[in-house]
Image (tube, rainbow, N blue to C red):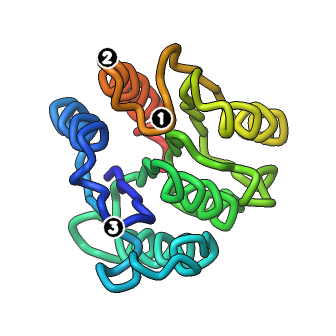
Amino acid sequence: MILFASGNGTCRARPPNDYVGGVLRNAQLGTMWLDLLTPFEVCDAPLRANIGLLSQRLGIVCDWLRRHGATRDLPIGLFGAGDGATAALQTGAALGDGSSSLAAIVSRGARPDCTGTLGRISAPTLLIVGGLDDGALGLNRAAYAAMRCKKRIEIVPGATHDFEEPGSPEVVARLARSWFLRYAHRV
């Protein structure tokens, strides 16, 4: 079960995310779209920047999936974009004791300097960053160096922070599908 985490209330409405979700479903991976803020909260700038709150909510959904009869035996993957990706990394750190069923994390365009505990992530983690996203490029490289889990960083040439350039969603989808299929057996 792949959780798509969004911190801005537009998770599924974003064309790159919707495309990635379709590719994952075609690979027979379940997807669950999760807006971590309500429509009213999205307008509150301090809440949008509260990665701790977003991560807490994502952790609650992971716990629910582990207890729910239909999903309890499924490994959980996290896919996040922007603040949702940063929340996914922080959730991975919180669940990093190895006892969870978190199978893998794919972070697209995160600002991983916000997590503070990257070394505690145990789930295999793929960092995807746009080659033209100067603000996130250095942060993702530093995050990669700080992680001790199975990890990979992919820089998508010509892509900006939103990955809406022609061909960028396809690259992100291919990378995410490959990563989740590789680690889907982990529970």
Is 77 in front, or is 20?
A: 20
In three-dimensional space, the C-alpha distance between marks 3 and 2, rounded to whole angstroms, equals: 24 Å
In three-dimensional space, the C-alpha distance between marks 3 and 1, rounded to whole angstroms, equals: 28 Å
Residue at point 47%, 77% (across, down): 57
Task: Specify the label residue 20 is tagged with.
Answer: none
Residue 163 horizontal side relative to residue 99, left or right: left
Residue at point 72%, 60% (across, down): 115
In three-dimensional space, the C-alpha distance between marks 1 and 2, rounded to whole angstroms, equals: 25 Å
Q: Which quarter of the figure has residue 136?
A: top right
Residue at point 22%, 31% (across, down): 23
Task: Specify the label residue 183 is tagged with.
Answer: 1
Assess whether mark 2 and mark 3 are in contact (beta carbons under 8 angstroms).
no
Residue at the extreme bottom of the image, as rendered? 40
Residue 151 is situated, as x and y percent measured from the top left of the image, at 66, 32
Mark 1 residue crowding within 10 angstroms, few (<14) / some (14–19) / many (20+):
some
Q: Secondary structure at mark 2?
A: loop
Residue 178 is situated, as x and y percent measured from the top left of the image, at 40, 24
